Image (cartoon, grey):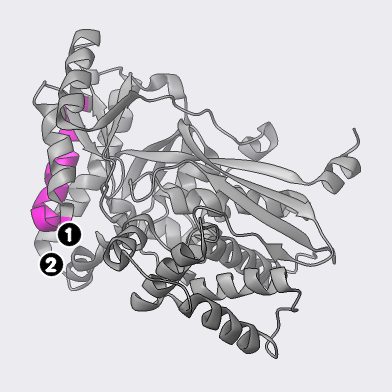
Amino acid sequence: MTAATKAEMGFERHAYARVGLLGNPSDVYNGKALSFTITDFSATVRLRPSPELLIQPHPHHDLVAFPSLPHLREDYHCCLKIGVPKHVEVWHFQFMQQIGITYNQKNKRKAARLFDLIIRSCSSAYLTSKVSRLQNEGYYGGVRLLMAICKVFYNHCIQNNISLKAENFTLSYDTNIPRQAGLSGSSAIACAALNCLLDFYDVRHLIKVELRPNLILDAEKELGIVAGLQDRVAQVYGGLVYMDFSQEHMDKLGHGIYRPLDVNLLPPLYLIYAENPSDSGKVHSSVRQRWLNGDEFIISCMKEVAQLALDGHRALLQKDCTELARLMNRNFDLRREMFGDDVLGSVNIKMVEVARSVGASSKFTGSGGAVVALCPDGEAQAELLHKACQEAGFVVQKIKVAPSVLSDEELTSLSTC
């Protein structure tokens, strides 16, 4: 099959969930990080050529499929109650497609009024439970992420004189990354979409690997997501990566220094997560303001957290699991001191404490919702970890580390400074 034929058929690209091993959340504060991706969970984006540019909502994650009109009415009014008019527009768009009305500025108000009239005629129930579902599971889904990365990608190409062919496409996505679990599910969707765009327009060689995480983060910033570059670097590179986000590098290069490492350096690790995780998007807010205000305690703690990533890099090279376990515990303890228990959440803290109750080291994979654990005493300790987690009602599984996703050509192109 020729390259042209493959392009006509479209592209399917994946991005894996991310685990922050050490250094997070110092990546937001010009620190360092040691992270890796896992094959346990991933996001998939599909791109196929089409006459018009179309972003397809996911039937579950974007809440556009319902058992009946009454169920749709419940979710619709919940969205209005908690203020998500852009998501409601997605429903209007889908409705207009079904009744054969072209979606444009002239007709969308007409269709919206008709849509609302139909919905308001249906019975209503379980409003409180539906609001809870939307708040816990998220109500924007991946459509907003796909739109944002398309916009950022296009703007970057214009600003850097990168020519794009005049062809349209349809984007769709799927993901099995647990929501709000601190596994970087949002950026995985954006990363997979960016890879589709790079290949569809054949510009992968024109956009540096080191700059691609910036594009993904810029897309998420468009949506008000507060985060650092760590997750995006891990997902663009794949595998195990050591990262240095010092201000000097950021100012000089426009990105950090990222070093892919051999995934075989990692000891066996375990993922623990709750079925009702916290909202990882809210966890940085107060600490960042204190850091910007020059709070000496926060600045000192963040410097120590960043140093943990560097020390962890050394521990991996020396195969020192005892030291790695100590560093992981210290990483969480510092986060707890800075953010406080109210921000971290009781369920998240309990996951860490359950792991530590059997002597395992543990810390958040991200900002909360999931924990990465190391059993320095081996398989017997891992069995105790499984038992303790199951008794506490948490999901636990051995982590499968993903390999690097960069081609030999891309690896050769990486900055060596």
Q: Which residue is mark 1?
A: 299
Do labels 1 and 2 touch, CB within 8 Å? yes
Q: Which residue is mark 2?
A: 295
Q: Secondary structure at mark 1?
A: helix
Residue 208 appears in the figure: no
Please provide percent x and percent y for residue 195: 65, 49
Disc 1 marks a residue whose amino acid type is Ile
232, above or below 82, in the image:
above
| Membership of 334 in magenta stretch | yes
In the image as oriented, which residue stretches furthest toward the top? Answer: 380
Label of residue 325 in the image: none
Please provide percent x and percent y for residue 56: 65, 59
Q: Residue at x 16, y 49 (%)?
A: 335
Q: Residue at x 45, y 40 (%)?
A: 17
Span shown in magenta: 325-343
| Membership of 76 in magenta stretch | no
Residues 192 and 258: in front is 192
Residues 396 and 236: in front is 396
Q: Secondary structure at mark 2?
A: loop
Taking the image as shown, residue 391 lies to the left or right of residue 138, namely left
- Secondary structure, magenta segment, majority class: helix
Residues 225 and 180: in front is 180
Disc 2 marks a residue whose amino acid type is Asp
Residue 294 appears in the figure: yes
Please provide percent x and percent y for residue 382: 23, 16
- What's the distance in space between the residues labelled 1 and 2, CA to CA? 6 Å
Q: Residue at x 24, y 59 (%)?
A: 283
Please provide percent x and percent y for residue 282: 27, 62
